[in-house]
Image: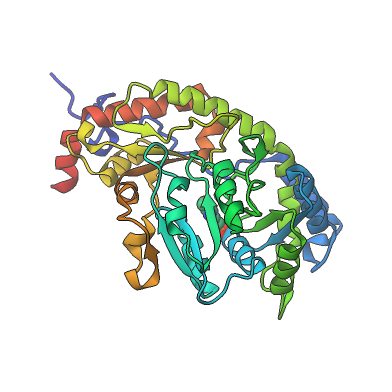
Amino acid sequence: MTNHNEKQPDQPAILGGTPVCDTGPPDWPFENEAVTEALQTVISNRTWGKYHGPNCEELSQKLAAYHDCEYAVLCASGTAAIELALRGLKVGPGDEVILAGYDFKGNFQDILTVGAIPVLVDLREDNWNLDVEQIESAITEKTTAIIATHLHGGVVDLPRLMSIANERNIPVIEDACQMPGANLFGKKAGMWGDVGALSFGGSKLLSAGRGGALVTNQEEIVQRARLYSHRGNEAYPLSELQAAVLLPQLKQLNEQNETRTRNVNTLLEMLSSQKAIVPFANLEPDTEPGHYKLGFQYNADECAGLSRDSFATAIRAEGIALDAGFRSLHKIHSKRRFRAVSDLAVADRADESVLVLHHPVLLQGQKQLAEINIAVEKVVAHSAEIGEHLSG
Ligand SMILES: *Cc1c(COP(=O)(O)O)cnc(C)c1O
């Protein structure tokens, strides 16, 4: 006699089976003794409550030294960093700013905030990041900046972009919010562009709950950004408390990046026979991308037509932090808000089929990595049933 209450190990959790990872995805940030100590220090010396204290000063210096650049300007978020970069480059009303059709929504919003017009360019077929070969067709006499964002473990070909941009005298903002400390073509992420942007948001690799920074060698950008961020009531700066928790994390960043890279390689090896999810390729020489999100292209044909969102829901039910990617910018904004230089066919596909794995699991062990693979196998094998279940 079969016991109907007994859960089948290979039954997907979304159909009533046992989740592969019954503790659910790890919560970020992790416990961190060095951060606890830093907090104790700022409590005892009371710098936590100061407008201007030693922590921001030290973080700014350490970030600049880490990036081997002249200036690091701290600010309230990565979104504020991009806005300050635009202001630092004197981008204003009537100007055009080029960015990828699939990008962080705040970047599009920042361009509108300074009164400029976003100009959308399509993605590379192989890694679904900005296709720099299409930049030239987007440039007009109104182009005053290009935003290049490294997304989901894929990288933009910055050396090539800089040669195109320098020839035309157009400054580049490099959005390194997803990969602080990554080695890209022999430089730190953020150091190829005229100015780089970092985020210290609550889910990010370096986290203070909120926060951001600009890194650059150009004094004029810094002067304008500082002038803007300090005017009025100083709405843009980072706090002493935030700087205090970031200092020990910056110290740990290289080691954690190495662990993430090693674990990404292990995971991709495990997943290499999966046709349902194909990783954003990294075929660049001299490059080790960072991993805030590990991106995949979802292939519904391998899953009985199961939608991307249903696939993510089923994997989530297994206790794995896999989610849909961004919406593509042309899909969520009125056509009056931007100009597009092509039909954005690849960005269309990205809109429908990007999946991203959240990074905390990448600092865990072999067991947790193997669970991701098991969850994917389970959901793929039962995709037809899951489709019926979720639509019924
Ligand atoms: C997180 C992020 C930002 C900035 O985010 P904030 O939450 O404003 O700090 C910018 N660009 C990308 C690609 C990001 O992932």
Whether residue 43 is visible here, answered yes or no, is no
Along the line of sight, the residue nearer the viewer: 138 or 257: 138
Screen quadrant of the N terminus = top left
Q: Is residue 21 above or below residue 213?
A: above
Question: Total of numbered circles in the picture?
Answer: 0
Q: Residue at x 72, y 43 (%)?
A: 250
Residue 110: x, y in percent? 53, 67
Residue 196: x, y in percent? 64, 53
Residue lying furthest bottom: 232
Along the line of sight, the residue nearer the viewer: 325 or 341: 341
Q: Residue at x 23, y 38 (%)?
A: 300
Q: Answer with left or right where residue 271 lies relative to residue 140.
A: left
Residue 97: x, y in percent? 50, 64
Whether residue 317 is visible here, answered yes or no, is yes
Q: Answer with left or right where residue 210 lies relative to residue 379.
A: right
View quadrant of ligand 1: bottom right
Residue lying furthest top: 1
Q: Answer with left or right where residue 139 lies relative to residue 212.
A: left
Q: Residue at x 77, y 44 (%)?
A: 68
Name which quarter of the figure residue 228 lies in: bottom right
Residue 266: x, y in percent? 49, 22
